[in-house]
Image: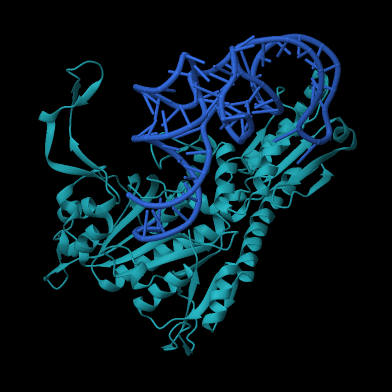
Chain colours: A cyan, B blue
Amino acid sequence: MAKELKDLTKRADNYSQWYNELVIKADLAEQSAVRGCMVIKPYGYAIWEKMQHQLDSMFKETGVQNAYFPLLIPKSFLSKEADHVEGFAKECAVVTHYRLKNNPDGQGVVVDPEARLEEELIIRPTSETIIWNTYRNWINSYRDLPLLVNQWANVFRWEMRTRLFLRTAEFLWQEGHTAHATKEEAQEKAIEMLNVYGDFAEKYMAVPVVKGVKTANERFAGALETYTIEAMMQDGKALQSGTSHFLGQNFAKAFDVKFINNENKLDYVWATSWGVSTRLMGALIMTHSDDNGLVLPPKLAPIQVVIVPIYRSQEQLDTVNAKVAPIVENLKKQGISVKYDNADNKRPGFKFADYELKGVPVRLVLGARDIENGTIEVMRRDTRGKGTVSIEGIEDYVVDLLDKIQENIYTKALNHRLEMTSKVDTWEEFKDQIEKGGFILAHWDGTTETEEKIKEETKATIRCIPLDGEEEEGKCVYTGKPSKRRVIFARNY
RNA sequence: CGGGGUGUAGCGCAGUUGGUUAGCGCGCCACGUUCGGGACGUGGAGGUCGGAAGUUCGAAUCAUCUCACCCCGACCA
């Protein structure tokens, strides 16, 4: 494996290929037989579960409840909202029959031609339509509002081109769908959920993000406004990591969801939707990993601390076991997930490398030498720095170290982004800078036409108009027309 | 869907002017010595060479078709 890693990093010019191979081999996922689908292996899934649980509790703090809606959607639902069908119809898997039968010509089974569905069903690419069709019956009065529902589900999009974690055909996600009595309340909700995503990315994933609004061109199909968190990967490319949409009354009108307001008048509800997916795992991997494998933020690591014993004989192992037991117990009491790996079928060196590959934040090593000295060896994954500390109070030391690692990898990623972000005012400079990667802050005249031309010439797109951006008079970097603020350009995944 | 590339053991690959029984490294299994950074020795298991149908005395190797995967576009979270 060591040789393999070296070979991989030597040809690291294509970053995504590097992380794909490294991480797949590192027990995260493997390609399944179905085109563009992924198998998430147990260790990878454990990371997703940690993310899921954290996000879920953050949603609930904002009053959101979970529910579940059907996988299959009648085809006609998709044509009710014009922009929506435009955005999704082309990439849907369609169910046409409901039965198989034994092949009359021999072995195997065939689709029973008698079992053709009157109306075809679509495997959900997203659930707006079926959810809004349901909401019609749930909402009558302003007293039923706001309706704040989230669903954890899989969705399927028959993408022309897939990339592991970043754009698989089937992926896991959550999609929140809310209904409100007023426009203002819905807009606020969309922003509120964007902030939840921003907090989650920065505080838990240790991935710094820019919060912003999408241009008309990059907007979600059917939305009036799309908010986004944009992260920068180590290679300088942008990754859209989560989106929150203000949908106006589009879906309410399409599915006839009306309510009686407090003035006794009938009105359409206002809507939002917001989602993050297993793409976040891609963001996590591509933000922090190094040549030795994954680097996980302590707050999302399935195993936060691993303890490896060093011994020659059974007696020595017994001694180490006895010494380690209270440490494990004390760490668990403090809510730390700790694994004591005293399996005797792998050598210590192998374990060291293996847990580094898996991104375990802290490693403790205890052997006869330490027991004599009353010490223990501590290794932190982020810097790979090693030290020997007193075994007294090791638990507090570790708890503190986990916090430091969480903070350090965030700071490291943030500094990387700042270094790779530049203000650009001329077109020549722009073309030059985009080749170097990273974010470019530039003025833009606000037209889709200019945006498209810049994309054609440089492959750079407007990632977002930052929400915290300052007003500043300037000239569009491409057309020279007046502009009031800078937007973020970058190449993206 | 267009352009390029790759399919040989679990993984990474060699072998390809057609020529016996298809090879290497890692991993796997057994035994022994080891065990503070991916141990070593000896022995062993593991393959319809992506698939189909051809040419040939003979095909991993040549031609045809086909499938899958990867990269680059168009599309997208």
Q: Is residue A486 above or below residue A6?
A: below
Q: In percent of the image, x 23 and y 22: which residue is there?
A: A109
A435 vs A141, left or right, is right
Q: For this rendering, which residue is in front, A211 or A35?
A: A35
Q: Is residue A336 left or right of residue A133?
A: right
Is residue A141 visible to us here?
no
**Above or below, comparing residue A249 to residue A288 in the picture:** below
Query: Would you place residue A190 above or below residue A290 in this image?
Result: below
**Residue A448: x, y in percent?**
35, 76
**Residue drawn at x 26%, y 72% as measured from the top left:** A183
Residue nearer the viewer, B72 or A389: B72
> Which of the 4 image quarters holds residue A103?
top left
Q: Residue at image x 67%, y 38%? A: A4
Task: Tell me how many marks there are.
Answer: 0
Residue A233 visible in the shown view: yes
Q: Considering depth in this image, is A139 or A286 the residue closer to the camera? A: A286
Q: Residue at x 30, y 49 (%)?
A: A125
Give the image quarter of residue A275: bottom left
Q: Position of residue A243 (x, y in %)?
A: 40, 61
Q: Position of residue A308 (x, y in %)?
A: 74, 33
Give percent across and percent down for residue A260.
13, 66
Residue B14, relative to residue B30: is it above or below? Answer: below
Screen quadrant of the N terminus of chain A:
top right
